[in-house]
Image: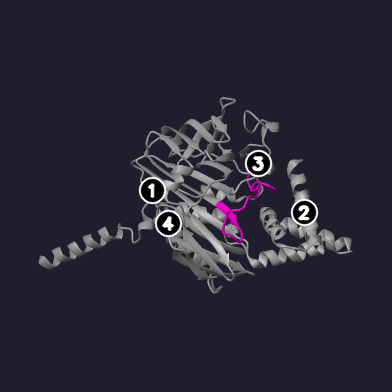
Amino acid sequence: MNRLLNRIAVIGMSMALATIPLFADDVAPAQDRFVVHEWGTFTTIVGDEGVALDWRPLNGSSDLPKFVYEIGGLSNARGLRHRFIRKDEVQAQVRMETPVVYFYAPQEMTASLRVQFPRGTISEWYPQAKAVSPNFIDWGQFKVMPTATVALPREKESSHYYAARETDAAVVRVCRTDSESFEHEKFLFYRGVGTFELPLTVQMLGDRVALQNTGVDDLGEVIVFENRAGKIGYRILCASRERVVVERPVTDRTLEALGRDLERLLTSQGLYEKEAKAMIETWRDQWFEEGLRAFYVLPLKATDAILPITIKPDPAELVRVLVGRVELITPEMENDLMVKVRKLGDPSYRVREKTSRELKQRGRFAEPTLRQLLAKTDDPEIKVRIKEVLARQETVATK
């Protein structure tokens, strides 16, 4: 009898253990309470002094689906209800990229959300908000529908926007302000640009990288990443109040390993595993492209100061994970652009046209790099050519 009871106990224990997650990431989102999670990115470009440079973050073609609303959409009744603002004209030091807000609830409920951006400008959003101004966005009341199955808008063209939907979050239903129709999405999405201080300074010192926490709260881990001609390297360290100087990463790592470390960092801040994966997948093409950059998570107090948020009813849990992404202008980038600027004086029209196209491929990062080159060069001919390129970019932006 005792032997039989022992066997039953062992079997019962095994069955119980089988229901216990092996890792914290395996825990499913709580369905018995109202939970709100948010992730997004603050992107800056820094030059020789480690100071964020002015640039036009919204210059160039949009990477968002056409159904997303924007500040420049007045011409087709999709934008702000007041003054027309051209996206390409907006200059700033920080691009606030793709904050998305997820909602989890045990049953259908009504909620409201308002985000302020006192030192910035809201530039894109979806679904349509009740009220939008440069310094805030307010969706008013909307429905959180955890069991709803609806067709979400999607275009034929690919976009990293859709990756953010791959979570267990509830569908939200927002009533359009101009009709009785509704818009549905798996999150509330907004973007913007601004000029404000971030708590980490990153600077190139020759062939090394210097980091320093200039904020009042601890930053935790910082990932210094480099993609050099397709080879990957990264370091994980802690930024302290004292300057930390490290060598540029040795390019002997893999994107798979980096993805795992980034996912661990994001989930350690409170994101669910699927949310962390969705964030990484959303920004994979830009986070891991060629270049040298640093990633870190802003302290919650800093995020709340930059983006004060009001949610009703008060959620049982609110997680906000805003990643700082610091892009460094490297000597290689400067040298490459200097070669291209010199080629703009080539007697061959084909060479000049090819070079102009290559400069455009540098996208929004070309302008701050060219401005830094302009300040450093003593060559009068190079100065003239750089000024001509910058003037053409400004002309395009103001048309």
Marks 3 and 1 in Cβ contact (< 8 Å):
no
Q: As drawn, is 150 to the left or to the right of 68? A: left
Residue on which the image places disc 2 = 387
Of label 4 and label 1, which has the lower sequence position?
1
Residue on which the image places disc 1 = 29
Of label 2 and label 4, which has the lower sequence position?
4
* Magenta-drawn stretch contains 3: no
| Distance from Cα at disc 2 to Cα at disc 4 | 39 Å
Element marked by disc 3: loop
Residue on which the image places disc 3 = 66
**Nearer mark to the viewer, of 4 and 3:** 4
| Distance from Cα at disc 3 to Cα at disc 1 | 31 Å
| Distance from Cα at disc 4 to Cα at disc 1 | 26 Å
Q: As drawn, is 34 to the left or to the right of 13? A: right
Instruction: Return the x and y of residue 279 as percentages of the image width and height.
Output: 51, 53
Considering depth in this image, is 80 or 46 the residue closer to the camera? 46
Residue on which the image places disc 4 = 219
| Distance from Cα at disc 3 to Cα at disc 2 | 33 Å
Of label 4 and label 3, which has the lower sequence position?
3
**Nearer mark to the viewer, of 4 and 1:** 4
Q: Amino acid at mark 2?
A: Lys
Of label 3 and label 2, which has the lower sequence position?
3
Marks 1 and 2 in Cβ contact (< 8 Å):
no
Element marked by disc 1: loop
Element marked by disc 4: loop
